[in-house]
Image (cartoon, coloured by chain):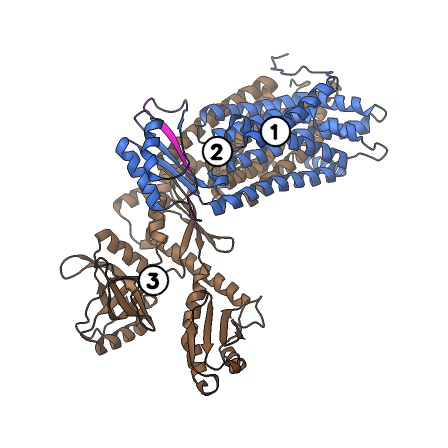
Chain colours: A brown, B blue
């Protein structure tokens, strides 16, 4: 009859207690957060300040300390969706291929004639040959430069495709190589964005790839998206070039193999530089803010052994000539080499503020982005707005909860009180599960919880109404309760499965706050079915076993 | 007998088909009116779907829309709309404004220069102004978001169609989905009528309405299936009436508790999610209405093949499970 086996009782009670224990830290949000931050700081730096020690000890270590993450709309922060220009890398690849192609073709100058690179779309390399009748031979030579692509999908394909038409040889990356390159570009970009954001020292940033060529960046607690953009939007490509000469305008004739770049240190000035850098920022091992001999902010750096050798050799051979330091296609400064610099370390001076020098050092340490980015979407939410939203949500939830509890008790008496108690446990379970899985609570998520408050009693209502009906057929109260639960089951399952389906779709297709809503709704459905079917039932069974009422009022 | 609040009497014998022409006609009229409204007035799409930038300002001075407009005029931002936001939760000296700027050229959401120019210009005329949130969506993303939204509503409807078809019969499935389409279209119509901002969260609300409304419909259907087996010779129409009457108390109770919670949120939850909560509140009302007056009418119209056993294929499974649990 009306019985639940002992181990099931224990299990139900254990789940409830566990859920409540997991949810409990959220009641002391600030204290627990301070505790967690202090532990994280200890892990990273190995030392704690006295305040951090106090923060750590404010919450006992043996208690659960999982918290519900607050979404950006509640905590405040910045959100960016960036698109990486993956095709920029193709151009770099083509430029890098040109010297090899030139060398290979030049070896057969006798048959194919003089060669020169001609203008082409950015993702192609076009070479004109002097002897058009030998184009087939040129294609053959160029093909020897190809290497097989090593990816799962690109088996059997080479990294470049070569074709010849008339007197022009066209080299471009193959589909497989493009896909592989894109993937590598994205991995690198993600890694570098992550390093830069981490270096800025903010809490729990979310950095993830989205789709083919996009990166989603969410940083709580940062003042504005513009700040975040300044941090991650800079390519920070540092190169050191020999200076060929100076020019008055950007259209100056640079000569073969040279480039004209604007100078940051003099207005309207331009430098003509050798296109091939002596050494680049990839070879840096360290960079930190510093001051130059005049006390102005500067950035000091150190090369790895390869970079140090190239740098040392070049400075030894070119004492007395200027040397340009180029950052993102702009000459920061072009000091004259005073002496041989053997140690591989140096200093970049320019017109920096202290902040700029600090940022540049950070960017150089984190490395250059392989390609530029465009920001497709950005959102900044101020912390005050988030705090207001939390407060409003809390009040609404409490008022809603109280009203629903009153309504249930008025409608179903003692059974209504059981349902109300189950509702409270249900909310604790939602928070407990969210804390355990590290779910994120957003403003629509709060709405989801409030909605769950309203809907969670549905399963109970179905059961209670059914019990009322069964009581009318004059069966004993125990039988009526049992039948009530049994017959209401199929309706409860169908109703919740359909809601679960739509919530799942919302989770899969939604983004940001909407996904937060879907998560609370999904968890809410599961916990409300659990509490309605098991928790209230356990209460009813326990009550029934104690009182053994001859008839029940519902 | 202790006091019990009863919104619905113990036993009811309403004839839900008596004014069939009127109620069903009303629904059809509302759907048509909604479609006409959406086509003629259009929806007030938020930046999620249209691209552009919104800036939420907060100031201790009363918001002077004209002054703000004149300040932003020289910046050549294109279409700029400025509205004041009211909410009972605001303090007396809390004046909140919403500035919306159309999408600028290119893929980019907004340039930092444009933003700082706007902020600087406004700070000159109103030194106490704070920019509490700034959101910007580029035209490329907004185009994709529209499709994601449409897909998600279609996918949810499709999933429900299939589930109901598997659990019940195809007539039920058609009836349930017709009710859903009715709910969604009428809700969108309300958004067109009042020109409430329509953004991604509203899509989330629409999907929740789908879930809620189907919930109500399924419970009526579930009882209908049970009664069809129980009263084999009763006309379909009467079995339907009986089923709706039997589940009426539950329908009203659940809608009641959900509405209580939602209304608390609508009034006290702040203006940021008001549109979202409004859509859900309206959806619960219309969803309850449609499960009583729309879904079953369509099933009646289509007819149910009662020779075949309309028994819940999984009822046995669940019953067994329950009995086991009682041991």
Helix, strand or loop for disc 3: loop
The residue closer to the viewer here, A329 or A113, is A113
Residue A531 in sight: no
Residue located beneath label 2 in the image: A446
Q: Residue furthest bottom?
A: A110
Respond whether the residues carrying marks 2 and 3 are from the same subunit: yes
Specify the subunit that label 3 lies on.
Answer: A
Residue occupying the point 30% across, 57% down: A362
Q: Estimate the spatial distance between the alpha carbons at disc 2 and disc 3, rounded to whole Å.
A: 44 Å
Q: Is residue B110 above or below residue A408?
A: below
**Magenta residues, as a range?**
B92-109
Is residue B107 one of those drawn in magenta? yes
Residue located beneath label 3 in the image: A237
Which quadrant: the C terminus of chain A? top right
Q: Which mark is drawn over residue A482?
A: none
Residue located beneath label 1 in the image: B36
């Amino acid at each position: 009859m009306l019985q639940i086996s002992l181990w099931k009782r224990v299990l139900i009670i254990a789940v409830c207690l566990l859920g409540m224990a997991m949810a409990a830290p959220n009641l002391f949000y600030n204290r627990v957060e301070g505790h967690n931050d202090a532990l994280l700081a200890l892990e990273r730096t190995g030392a704690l300040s006295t305040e951090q020690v106090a923060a750590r000890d404010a919450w006992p270590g043996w208690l659960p300390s999982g918290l519900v993450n607050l979404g950006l709309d509640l905590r405040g922060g910045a959100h960016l969706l960036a698109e990486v220009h993956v095709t920029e890398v193709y151009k770099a690849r083509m430029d890098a291929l040109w010297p090899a192609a030139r060398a290979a073709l030049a070896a057969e100058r006798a048959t194919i004639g003089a060669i020169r690179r001609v203008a082409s779309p950015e993702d192609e390399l076009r070479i004109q040959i002097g002897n058009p009748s030998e184009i087939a031979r040129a294609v053959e030579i160029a093909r020897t430069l190809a290497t097989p692509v090593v990816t799962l999908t690109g088996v059997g394909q080479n990294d470049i495709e070569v074709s010849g038409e008339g007197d022009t040889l066209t080299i471009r990356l193959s589909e497989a190589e493009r896909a592989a390159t894109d993937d590598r570009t994205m991995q690198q970009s993600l890694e570098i964005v992550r390093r830069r954001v981490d270096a800025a020292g903010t809490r729990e940033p979310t950095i993830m790839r989205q789709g083919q060529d996009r990166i989603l960046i969410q940083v709580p607690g940062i003042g504005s998206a513009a700040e975040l953009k300044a941090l991650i939007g800079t390519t920070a490509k540092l190169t050191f070039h020999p200076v060929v000469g100076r020019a008055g305008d950007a259209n100056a004739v640079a000569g073969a193999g040279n480039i004209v770049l604007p100078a940051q240190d003099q207005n309207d000035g331009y430098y003509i530089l050798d296109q091939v850098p002596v050494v680049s920022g990839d070879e840096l091992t360290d960079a930190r803010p510093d001051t130059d001999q005049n006390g102005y902010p500067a950035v000091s750096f150190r090369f790895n052994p390869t970079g140090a050798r190239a740098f040392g050799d070049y400075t030894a051979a070119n004492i007395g000539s200027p040397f340009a330091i180029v950052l993102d296609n702009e000459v920061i400064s072009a000091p004259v080499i005073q002496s041989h610099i053997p140690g591989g370390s140096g200093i970049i001076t320019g017109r920096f503020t202290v902040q700029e020098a600090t940022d540049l050092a950070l960017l150089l340490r984190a490395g250059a982005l392989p390609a530029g980015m465009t920001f497709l979407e950005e959102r900044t939410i101020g912390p005050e707005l988030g705090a207001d939203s939390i407060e409003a949500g809390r009040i609404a939830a409490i008022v809603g909860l109280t009203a629903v509890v009153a309504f249930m008790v008025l409608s179903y008496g003692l059974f209504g009180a059981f349902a109300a108690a189950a509702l409270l446990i249900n909310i604790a379970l939602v928070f407990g599960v969210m804390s355990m899985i590290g779910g994120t609570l957003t403003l629509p998520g709060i709405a989801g919880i409030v909605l769950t408050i309203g809907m969670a009693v549905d399963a109970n209502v179905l059961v209670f109404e059914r019990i009322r009906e069964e009581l009318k057929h004059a069966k004993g109260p125990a039988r009526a309760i049992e039948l009530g639960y049994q017959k209401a089951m199929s309706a409860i399952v169908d109703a919740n499965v359909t809601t679960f389906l739509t919530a799942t779709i919302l989770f899969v297709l939604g983004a940001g706050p909407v996904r937060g809503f879907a998560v609370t709704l999904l968890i809410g459905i599961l916990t409300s079915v659990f509490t309605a079917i098991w928790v209230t039932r356990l209460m009813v069974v326990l009550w029934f076993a104690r009182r053994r009422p001859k008839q029940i009022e519902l | 007998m202790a006091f019990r609040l009863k919104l619905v009497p113990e036993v009811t014998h309403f004839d839900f088909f008596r004014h069939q022409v009127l109620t069903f006609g009303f629904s059809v009229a509302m759907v048509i009116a909604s479609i006409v409204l959406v086509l003629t007035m259009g929806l007030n799409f938020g930046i999620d779907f249209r691209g552009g930038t919104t800036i939420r300002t907060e100031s201790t001075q009363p918001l002077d829309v004209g002054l703000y407009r004149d300040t932003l005029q020289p910046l050549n931002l294109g279409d700029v709309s400025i509205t004041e936001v009211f909410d009972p939760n605001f303090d007396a000296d809390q004046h909140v404004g919403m500035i919306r700027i159309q999408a600028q050229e290119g893929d980019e959401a907004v340039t930092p220069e444009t933003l700082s120019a706007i902020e600087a210009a406004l700070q000159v005329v109103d030194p106490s102004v704070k920019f509490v949130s700034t959101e910007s969506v580029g035209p490329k993303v907004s185009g994709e978001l529209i499709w994601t939204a449409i897909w998600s509503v279609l996918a949810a409807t499709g999933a429900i169609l299939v589930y109901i078809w598997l659990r019940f019969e195809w007539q039920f499935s058609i009836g349930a989905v017709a009710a859903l389409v009715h709910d969604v279209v009428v809700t969108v119509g309300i958004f067109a009528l009042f020109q409430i901002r329509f953004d991604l969260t509203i899509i989330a609300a629409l999907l929740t309405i789908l879930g809620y409304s189907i919930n109500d419909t399924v419970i009526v259907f579930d009882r209908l299936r049970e009664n069809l087996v129980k009263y084999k010779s009763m006309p379909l129409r009467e079995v339907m009436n009986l089923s709706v009457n039997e589940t009426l108390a539950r329908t009203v109770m659940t809608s009641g508790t959900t509405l209580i919670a939602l209304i608390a949120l609508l009034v006290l939850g702040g203006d940021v999610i008001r549109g979202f909560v409004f859509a859900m509140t309206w959806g619960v009302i219309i969803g309850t209405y449609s499960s009583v007056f729309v879904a079953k009418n369509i099933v009646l119209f289509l007819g149910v093949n009662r020779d075949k056993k309309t028994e819940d294929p999984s009822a046995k499974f669940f019953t067994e499970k329950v009995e086991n649990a009682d041991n």
